[in-house]
Image (cartoon, helix red, strand yellow):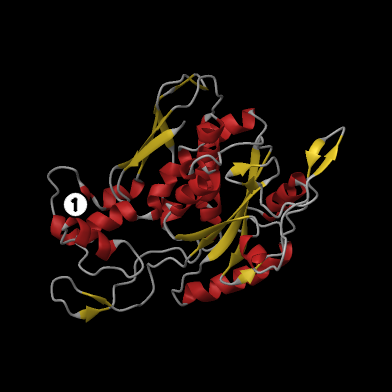
Amino acid sequence: MLRYLTAGESHGPALTAILEGMPPGVSIAQEDFDELLKKRNGGYGRGKRSQMEPEKVEVLSGIVNGKTIGSPIAIMIRNADYENHKAYMAPFNATNPEIGEINIPLPGHADLAGIIKYGFKDCRYVRERASARETAIRTAISVPARNFLKEKAITSICMVESIGGIKANIDLDKPKEELEKAINKNGNDFLTPDPDIISQWKSLIDDCEEKNISLGGSGIIVFYGLPIGLGSYVEYDRRLDGILAQSIMSIPAIKGIEIGNAYEISQKKGNSSDRILYDNNKGFYRTSNLAGGLEGGMTNGQPLIIRFYMKPLPANPNIESVDLKTKKSVKPEYYRSDTQAVTAAAVIVESIASITLASSLL
């Protein structure tokens, strides 16, 4: 099984990750990291932080001459913005730590629970690590897992389904090639196969950006070519739907996931399962995918469909909080934010799920 750890603060010197358990011989190129992180940084309505960070991955171990060698893979992404925060974020001998203090917990963020848990008097120590900036390195460390899956003919696509309550028209019954072609044609601004939704989303984002309002939304990840039987029904902690839920729900701002059309099926009366048929040429098969590719905690050979739901980012809510020093009510200052980051979330969810599935395959 694969396991990984990440380290680094949002405005510290760098983000780092170590991935252990990747077998030798998996092909990896520098461009694999570059293209994936560029896609994560894309999206109409992203903030200035995504534009200022070069997101260049440095491989420190585990890959030699474009191939994994079986040892732990260590990577690093340096934070360009660290230069503007060294006075209070330097590991040693910070010259002016007081100017970096954050005394007002941001509603919707980890600030208040974190300072109470660890006994801090400064929210920065919590916010720097709880920040979604950490997902840059998690996305990057998924590259070996993604390439391992591709070598086993397992592929995936990620797309945005809705932003701010406005939903795209997506037909998941279409072939993967057709969906992928449509997404690529519409570009990385929205990662959607529906060209008619783009003008509505742009108008909504432009309006909300002027008012410092952030938007949530939902996305869909589909994996193709998974074999039957990943995961297991024999113990609760080996059920793949539970493992996927834990890994995806660990992403900041993700508040829920579905396998397939879970909510829609929950509203049905009577049977909502897929018929099982048999043909001498293709063996067992189904004509529908209501289960979303998972039954009894195991993949069933159909495309695995994962939906995620992301809340609006909390950096500009204009919601009342409390000053930690004075204990008086106050509203936090505006904190740099994306107007929407559902596009980035789709890439991140696909990345995390790729690690989970590669681990299960191993």
Q: Position of residue 271 (x, y in %)?
A: 72, 61
The residue lying toward the viewer, choosing from 307 and 296, is 296
Is 299 above or below relative to 325? above
Is 3 above or below relative to 313? above
Left or right for 59, reference 204? left
The residue lying toward the viewer, choosing from 214 and 351, is 351
Q: Position of residue 228 (x, y in %)?
A: 66, 36
Left or right for 32, reference 86? right
The residue lying toward the viewer, choosing from 43 and 308, is 308
Q: Which residue is mark 1?
A: 87
Q: Position of residue 105 (x, y in %)?
A: 26, 68
Q: Position of residue 295 (x, y in %)?
A: 63, 47
Are there few (<14), some (14-19), or many (20+) residues within 10 Å of tag 1? some
Q: Amino acid at mark 1?
A: Ala
Left or right for 42, reference 274? left
Helix or strand or loop: what does disc 1 sit on? helix
| Residue located 65% across and 59% down the image | 261
Is 356 above or below relative to 321? above
Using the rendered view, name the quadrant where residue 258 is placed: bottom right
Of all residues, the one furthest to the right in this rendering is 280
| Residue located 66% across and 35% down the image | 227
Using the rendered view, name the quadrant where residue 259 is placed: bottom right
